[in-house]
Amino acid sequence: MDEGGTPLLPDSLIYQIFLSLGPADVLAAGLVCRQWQAVSRDEFLWREQFYRYYQVARDVPRHPAATSWYEEFRRLYDSVPCVEVQTLQEHTDQVLHLSFSHSGYQFASCSKDCTVKIWNNDLTISLLHSADMRPYNWSYTQFSQFNQDDSLLLASGVFLGPHNSSSGEIAVISLDSFALLSRVRNKPYDVFGCWLTETSLISGNLHRIGDITSCSVLWLNNAFQDVESENVNVVKRLFKIQNLNASTIRTVMVADCSRFDSPDLLLDAGDQATPPCRVFDLGCNSEDEAAGPVLRAPGHAKEGLRRALDGMLDGHTQLSERTLETRVAELLAQGHTKPPERSAARNKYLIFTTGCLTYSPHQIGIKQILPHQMTTAGPVLGEGRGSDAFFDALDHVIDVHGHIIGMGLSPDNRYLYVNSRAWPPGSVVADPMQPPPIAEEIDLLVFDLKTMREVKRALRAHRAYTPNDECFFIFLDVSRDFVASGAEDRHGYIWDRHYNICLAKLRHEDVVNSVAFSPQEQELLLTASDDATIKAWRSPRTMRIFQAPRPRPRPFFSWFASHRR
């Protein structure tokens, strides 16, 4: 401006100049004068800066809760937990899992050193308690979860035994006294276990039927097993599900459907012209059901089995032993499977990994839990189940055509995020014991549990390198605005849920196994690694608040003395 306050350059020209600058230079130029300050906060300018800096697709609209493009740019730049503030080194071996209490005041960690550690989450994190599980014949601890009122901790572990052993156990720890309240068998161990209610937890058991055929039973257990009355159940069978081709049920979790209609963030379905994954609804009579398993009456199953056996005896059909076992098991189960029950009101979904082609988990099973199933009270085991309803059918199956290595729910439980390593396009599983090779690049898929559709495009950036037979779980976590995941490339990753962009890479010295957002403060993230450390990360905004100098109050007596004079 000249001495009279008249601008020497029009706003339009300054705007064009600012378009060629980066965000930091635009903010610095805005300090020169009032005219430049006004132009530096222009909405169109910051819209261009946003799309260019974060490389967001132009057809993606602004976040629905954003008030301006400038504030939205600042949110992504300033509120992502990417500043390392503390490294916890109390574990002596690989740290496998992290979980926060619902209040955010505490968190738990599990490790190959066979301890479950409970931490106090303050400005400086401190160790509160360490439970050594080796006296109970555990090899290591692998998973933990706080119940809804944060009074109990579920800890899951693996028993000592041969390399191919799949047995594990779930322990319930009181968070008041840190006493061990109960222990429940869990097989296979990577069922992990989860809470269904504040005092009831889900575990698994596996029964072998043939060489590659088995049956998974999911149990509902009372957390307090010392019930004095013999008429009170402490365990109840939830579901009994047939497994084919060496598959088993793993990684159980429960989704609460009560908030489906009011999610924290409504995700757009996006372009679904060529969806890479398929969701089968097994509880309806639509035409799409032909793509999934079909339930038949016992007479039809026996007739189909008879035709298959006649074909083999006549030499018209050549089947391997494993294929024959699977075919017979399928035909027998078709007449002895209880169809899905329907309830007018959605209550809770039981979600787990499963499969139908090979032992590697490549499908997600979804089963509705009805109100009468949410307590251990009721009929004794096996009562109410006739001989014609030996197995339970699933409500929905999601096939991801790849190896599932992680799952997590959004805070409102409406969206399911899945870490998957894809199979090659068009690959066919000829032998259930030899699954297809899996990609090094991890796809982070998103499914809407209300509509049962895949939403958004897959998030990518993280990688894994272990082959199929050595593949392990990489835990992810979801907050209101962000999703984070570990990876085998020695980094944790953070993406924005709305814009589908990677915002930060968090460095470790080895594989990052687990991540966890504070449920009360998404600007705090924890990461756990094979380097035996847990790192705490905070956002730049939070760090400025913590480090801001606080004014020192004047002592009362000095103030009083100055006023007396």
Image (cartoon, rainbow, N blue to C red):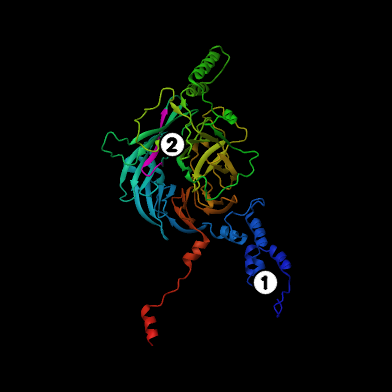
Rendered location of residue 480, percent (x, y): 51, 52
Instruction: State the residue in front, 88 or 565.
Output: 565
Query: On the picture, is 99 further left or further right than 499?
Result: left
Checking the image for residue 35, the label placed there is 1
The residue that disc 2 covers is: 370
Closer mark to the observer between disc 2 and disc 1: 2
The relative height of residue 487 versus residue 314 in the rendered view (above or below) is: below
Residue at image position (37%, 78%) is: 556
At which x and y percent is residue 326? 50, 24
Q: Is residue 359 left or right of residue 20?
A: left
Of callouts 2 and 1, which one flags the residue occurring earlier in the amino acid sequence?
A: 1
Q: How far apart, in angstroms, are the residues tagged by discs 2 and 1?
A: 64 Å
The answer to which of 172 and 514 lies nearer the viewer is 172
Task: Please state which amino acid type lies under the numbered disc 1.
Answer: Gln
Identify the residue shown where x is 60% and y is 51%. Answer: 499
Residue pictured at 67% horizontal, 70% vertical: 36
